């Protein structure tokens, strides 16, 4: 099978799980955007890992410890077809990172913290189907991209995230975007205003 076929076979096998692909899906189903990030509820994580081990090659699992309501794990897996130089990562294969929760760096140090359980459940409830896979909703993509740029990358937003944000702001209403950002971050209206003004580096919490 090709890398694309292996990826589809794995995703099809996960259909009964409450998974969400939340990053790296811009080029799917043909290519990953470097890698594909997906999560399931913690109670389904063992099932997800078992399915991945049957269809993909497992890398090293990382656990950042417990925070608020669950631990924070991710486990990379790779398709095993012959290397394909058209795939935009060093592995020249689909890399699929499996998460058991949603978590980001804290603004004060290099530790990690989960999003709240209610917001986590809402992200799953709002997921959307595209082609054969379940993606994060566009409103949650806005909120999570802010978390990615402002927290994980400490304000050093990647160009692709800036470009994607402008597409999202032109698609999702201001009211819905602010409401969703407020579920996970403080000062949602101010955050939204800075996004509109493309003042990404100004979105921060000291």
Image: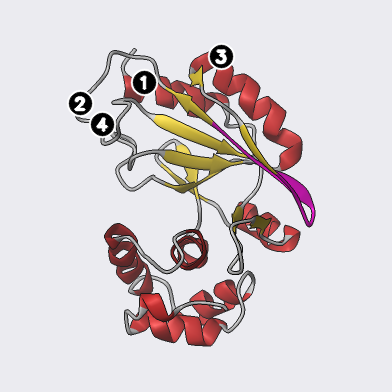
* CB-based contact (under 8 Å), mark 1 and mark 3: no
Picture quarter with the C terminus: bottom right
Residue 7's spot in the image, x, y percent?
42, 25
Residue under numbered circle 4 = 87
Q: Name which of mark 2 and mark 3 comes first in the sequence.
A: 3
Nearer to me, 122 or 72:
72
Q: Residue at image x 35%, y 67%?
A: 165
Foreground disc of the pair 1, 3: 3
Q: CA distance from mark 1 to mark 3?
A: 14 Å
Label 4: state its secondary structure.
Answer: loop
Which of pointers 1 and 2 indicates the residue nearer the eye? Answer: 2
Q: CA distance from mark 1 to mark 2?
A: 17 Å
Residue that carries the numbered disc 3 in the rendered image: 54
Q: Residues within 10 Å of mark 3 (few under 14, many from 20)?
A: few
Question: In terms of depth relative to the viewer, which is nearer, 105 or 137?
Answer: 105
Which residue occupies the foreground of this view, 13 or 35? 35
- 10 Å crowding of disc 2: few (<14), some (14-19), many (20+): few
Indicate yes or no whether the magenta region holds residue 137: no
Q: Which residues are magenta?
A: 65-75
Residue behind mark 2: 85
Residue displayed at 48% across by 18% down: 56
Predominant SS of the magenta segment = strand
Q: Quadrant of the N terminus?
A: top left
Give residue 66's position: percent from left, percent from top: 76, 48
Res 5 label: 1
Q: Disc number at residue 79?
A: none
């Amino acid at each position: 099978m090709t890398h694309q076929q292996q990826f589809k076979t794995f995703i099809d096998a996960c259909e009964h799980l409450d998974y969400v692909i939340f990053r790296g899906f811009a080029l799917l189903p043909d290519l990953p955007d470097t890698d594909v990030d997906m999560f399931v509820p913690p109670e389904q994580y063992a099932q997800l890992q078992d399915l991945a081990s049957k269809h993909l090659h497992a890398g090293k699992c990382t656990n950042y410890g417990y925070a608020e309501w669950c631990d924070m794990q991710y486990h990379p897996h790779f398709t095993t077809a012959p290397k394909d130089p058209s795939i935009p990562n060093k592995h020249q294969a689909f890399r699929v990172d499996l998460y058991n929760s949603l978590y980001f760096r804290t603004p004060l140090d290099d530790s990690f913290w989960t999003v709240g359980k209610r917001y986590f459940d809402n992200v799953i409830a709002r997921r959307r189907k595209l082609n054969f896979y379940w993606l994060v909703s566009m409103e949650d993509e806005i909120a999570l991209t802010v978390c990615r740029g402002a927290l994980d990358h400490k304000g050093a937003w990647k160009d692709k995230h800036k470009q994607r944000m402008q597409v999202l702001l032109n698609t999702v209403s201001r009211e819905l975007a602010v409401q969703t950002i407020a579920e996970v971050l403080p000062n949602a209206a101010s955050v939204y205003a800075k996004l509109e003004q493309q003042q990404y580096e100004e979105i921060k919490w000291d």
